[in-house]
Image (spheres, grey):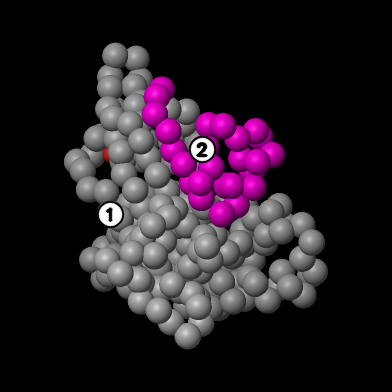
Amino acid sequence: MNSIPTNTGIDVSPSAMRKDPVIEIRNLKKSFGAQEVLSDVSLDLYNGENLVVVGKSGTGKSVLIKCIVGLLRADGGDVTVFHEKINGLNRREFGVMRQKIGFLFQSGALYDSMTVKQNLEFPLRRIRKNLSEQEIKEKVNDALENVGLSDALNKMPSQLSGGMRKRISLARTLVVDPMIMLYDEPTTGLDPVTSDEISSLINEVQKNIKLLQS
Ligand SMILES: Nc1ncnc2c1ncn2[C@@H]1O[C@H](COP(=O)(O)OP(=O)(O)O)[C@@H](O)[C@H]1O
Ligand SMILES: [Mg+2]
């Protein structure tokens, strides 16, 4: 495909958008004992693309995500994120990489003993060490507004419904501005109406997530 010239000098043709995979997986293998869960999984994911991995329960979807974010070490193959091989990174480099990847756990996993506000401040204080208190406050408020739950700021997770907790988990992931979002069964276990609400929210998030400027 020929590139489309633009007056900005930036090549925005589909071929240019596609030329750099953001995530590259090659021949990924993972077994637990004699059980082979991932056998030669390969895929490319490009800037702006959304990929849904479908499979029955126990087929390795969560294991695949955990290998991408380094929560599990693969037995073979390579995962490359933003042109860097995950298994070639040292601890510090890996920490930097992880900050670019947002991960919504299947369970949501909020800290039960913290308020919603504290849950959202937690990753910000850990990852964005140079933010002022005012900036933290603004980021937390923005993140809550984005998921339609500004009122929940001072609530405890136990005071929220399953769908609300899921939204707060999403806000907590988004508050640090990830460049890639990974969702592990974001709507499983929710009633159909809540499940639809979360799906629309994720659609919005995916539209707004920052495109990689490369
Ligand atoms: N840490 C682990 N230790 C041993 N087996 C595991 C571990 N994590 C996952 N498995 C096994 O790997 C298989 C795939 O699991 P998983 O990726 O969670 O499936 P799903 O597609 O439902 O997300 C399952 O059989 C599971 O029991
Ligand atoms: Mg799973």
Question: Residue flagged by tag 2: what amino acid is it?
Answer: Lys
User: Which of the 4 quarters of the picture holds residue 161?
Assistant: bottom left
Which residues lie in the magenta part?
A: 75-100
Q: Residue at x 64, y 55 (%)?
A: 123
Answer yes or no: disc 2 within 8 Å of ligand 1: no
Q: Is residue 121 left or right of residue 101?
A: right
Residue 7 percent across, percent down from the top left = 47, 85
Q: Is residue 16 left or right of residue 180?
A: left
**Does residue 98 appear in this view?**
yes
Residue ranking furthest to the top:
34
Q: Secondary structure at mark 2?
A: strand
Tell which of 199 and 82 is nearer to you. 82
Q: Residue at x 21, y 43 (%)?
A: 55
Mark 1 closeness class: few <14, some 14–19, many ≥20 residues within 10 Å: few
Tell which of 172 and 115 is nearer to you. 172
Q: Residue at x 28, y 22 (%)?
A: 36
Q: Is residue 200 above or below residue 176?
A: below
User: Which of the 4 quarters of the picture holds residue 155?
Assistant: bottom right
**Does residue 198 appear in this view?**
no
Q: Residue at x 27, y 49 (%)?
A: 53
Q: Which residue is mark 2?
A: 85
Q: Is residue 53 above or below residue 71?
A: below
Residue 209 percent across, percent down from the top left = 47, 69
Tell which of 3 and 179 is nearer to you. 3
Kindly identify which numbered label has been placed on residue 52: 1
